């Protein structure tokens, strides 16, 4: 199935972060409304509509952060393996033009 390709990394193998993130997000999408519907959790419609998207954003953000951190560390390890030294830290960007506060 092509949808399962989203769980594979650049090497073509399934990655733990992607599988756990997808599973956790699916569980949240299904269980939160189900718990409210069955009356196990009481919440007003307004509070549910505010909190539910924030929970989905937290699931997706945590998954994306874990994948990005792992990819960065793998890239650093490959540089160390091929060159024998740590990659250089990028220089600080140049300071932009001074802004003028129009309210003063």
Image: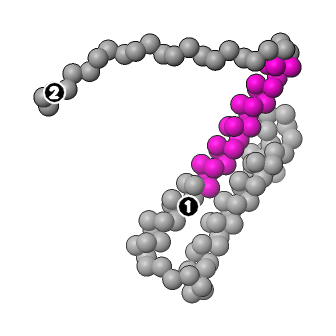
Note whether 50 is above or below 62 in the view shown.
below
**Residue labelled with disc 2:** 102
Residue 79's x, y, as percent? 79, 19
Where is residue 41? Give x, y as percent. Answer: 56, 82
| Res 8 quadrant in image | top right
Q: Secondary structure at mark 1?
A: helix
Cα gap from disc 2 to disc 1, whole angstroms: 39 Å
Q: Left or right: 100 with respect to 50?
A: left
> Which contiguous range is marked in magenta?
59-81
Crowd band around label 2 with a 10 angstrom C-alpha radius: few (<14), some (14–19), many (20+): few
Residue 86 at x, y percent in the picture: 75, 18
Q: Quadrant of residue 71?
A: top right
Above or below 34: residue 15: above
Q: Residues within 10 Å of mark 1 (few under 14, many from 20)?
A: some
Left-right relation of 76 to 50: right
Residue position marked by numbered label 1 in the rendering: 55
Which residue appears at 19% of the width and 26% of the height?
Answer: 101
Residue plotted at (15% across, 27% down): 102
Q: What predominant SS class does the magenta segment belong to?
A: helix
């Amino acid at each position: 199935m092509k949808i399962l390709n989203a769980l594979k990394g650049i090497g073509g193998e399934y990655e733990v972060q992607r599988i756990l993130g997808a599973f956790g997000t699916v569980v949240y999408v299904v269980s939160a409304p189900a718990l409210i519907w069955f009356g196990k959790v009481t919440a007003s419609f307004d509070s549910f509509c505010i909190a539910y998207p924030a929970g989905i954003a937290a699931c997706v953000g945590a998954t994306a952060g874990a994948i990005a951190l792992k990819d960065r560390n793998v890239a650093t390890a490959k540089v160390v393996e091929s060159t024998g030294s740590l990659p250089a830290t990028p220089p600080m960007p140049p300071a932009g033009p001074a802004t003028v506060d129009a309210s003063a």
